[in-house]
Amino acid sequence: MSLFISGAEVITMDETTGSTPVRLDIRVEDGVITAIGTDLEAAAGDTVIDGRDKLVAPGLVNAHTHSWETLFKGRFDNLPLELWMLFSYPLLGDVRVDPDLVRLRSQLFAAESLKAGVTTVIDDVLETPDQNFGQLDAVFDAYEDAGIRANISGHIINEPFVDTLPFTGELLDDHLLEQVRGMPVPSTEEYLAFSEQAFSRYRGRAGGRLNYMVAPSGPQRCADDLLTAATQMAVDQGAECHIHVLETKTQAVTGHEFYGTTLVKHLERIGALSGNTTFAHGIWVTDEDIEVIADAGVSVSHNPTSNLKLGSGVLPWRRYLDAGVNLGLGSDGGSSSDTPRMLEVVKAAALLHKISGPDFEAWPTVHEVLHAATVGGARSGVLQETTGSLEVGKRADLVIYDLETLAFTPRNSLEIQLVYSENGGSIEYVVVDGEIVVDHGQLTTVDEEALIEEFAQRRPQLQAWQDELESMNSAFVPAFTQIHQKAHGRDLGFTRFLG
């Protein structure tokens, strides 16, 4: 398909014009941006979009999310991470999800993302007790059909979950401790073999639009040899290594309890950092940790809406940027933030750090926030040569906004209005890999109504399943509450809370 956009206001996010809108024409051929400039002319056979009163911007990159949690959207509130995980990632009960349900949840997640202007997702897919190729195939199939770009993980926890938290031995009932410690976990060798096969199985999928990535869950949740091997595998494969690091104060305490140092320094000590590594969250870092992250070229995916909902703390935005760390933005999961709509994340990032201190010159700029939502997210996913900005040679992942809407009236600074005023209601077209996947609010690749109806038919069975899981795993709440309280009683010498 060839596409021609004439005379639009364009935010390229390239190194020349950045986030400043410029009136330009754009030509797309075979999914690639082949020309950007003024006074270009459409060719015979082009699909032409009149860019008058339109804003064109790079598609948003969701640099950290979990499509699995779509099934748990809207079920939980006022739970810190460690207690929330008891119900979103249950320890007890039959939690295996069949491939057909994986397909459905993935299609729903992709549909909501695309309609909100998200063209790329870094989807850290976790299946418990383990992941098989039937489930992973279902995610790849769903995303190929939907037309979204994605890094899709094999998420791995290979330590018994109760051994990934401090104080469980003294606070958890012996019977529960025995139950969960007796559950099998994948070995390092099994995960590496699975991932080698996955890289081979999915290489070039959907013309390179879909990629596999390794995802050790967190340094405290995985064996050291797995962490180092997965880091090297990602480098060898030219892929992303995606890992949760220091989302909560409990995790910061965990580092000192388990390793006698911070989790970041532990990863550095064992050689498990690279320029292909992305830390999801990275809130409870020290200044020394930030130096280590910067020196290693590690990216950090900032998830402000999830961090706010789970009460995890406030990421040190300005300290990261001053150190030269690449930041992306993520929605986190469908249950931890209850939405994959990245414009909400963009606005939250722009607002949250204004209350970190009174020095307004240190507050996030619109350009910095849009950079994190596009270029920074692409860099975190090792996709910087493919997407994130509108430049000749990159794939055509873009969003076209109607400027004749209330969000852009009066029409003042379009980039400021995109961050603070627009909520997705002005989106007219979404293009991924040169294909129009959303046309005036309607998905062109999947039947949204059919998806919703299919899910509605399965809802009673799913809710009964979820109710049973929540009832079973409530047994852990008293001990996990004590773990949370004990960890938060520790003095780390700094805080990431406000007020």
Image: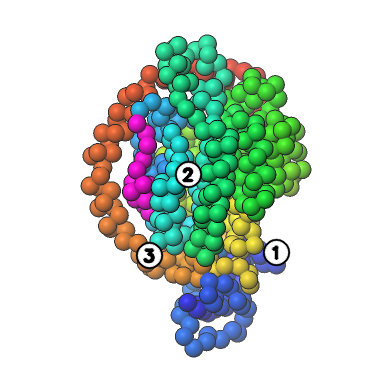
In front here: 323 or 203? 203
- Residue identified by numbered label 2: 125
**Could you tell me residue 276's position as x and y percent?**
66, 48
In front here: 149 or 490? 149
Mark 2 crowdedness (10 Å alpha carbons): few <14, some 14-19, many ≥20: many
* Residue at left offset 55%, top offset 39%: 191
* Residue at left offset 69%, top offset 34%: 267
**Could you tell me residue 185's position as x and y percent?**
50, 30
Proximity of marks 1 and 2: CB atoms separated by less than 8 Å:
no
- Residue identified by numbered label 3: 445
Q: Nearer the viewer, mark 3 or mark 1?
A: 3
Residue type, mark 3 in image? Thr
Left/right of residue 309 with respect to residue 452 in the rendered view: right
Distance (Cα) linking label 2 and label 3: 22 Å
**Magenta region:** 94-109
User: Mark 1 or mark 2, which has the lower sequence index?
Assistant: 1
Please identify the quadrant where the C terminus is shown: top right
Q: Is residue 91 above or below residue 436?
A: above
Q: Is residue 36 magenta?
A: no
Left/right of residue 476 with respect to residue 240 in the rendered view: left
Mark 3 crowdedness (10 Å alpha carbons): few <14, some 14-19, many ≥20: some
* Residue at left offset 40%, top offset 29%: 90
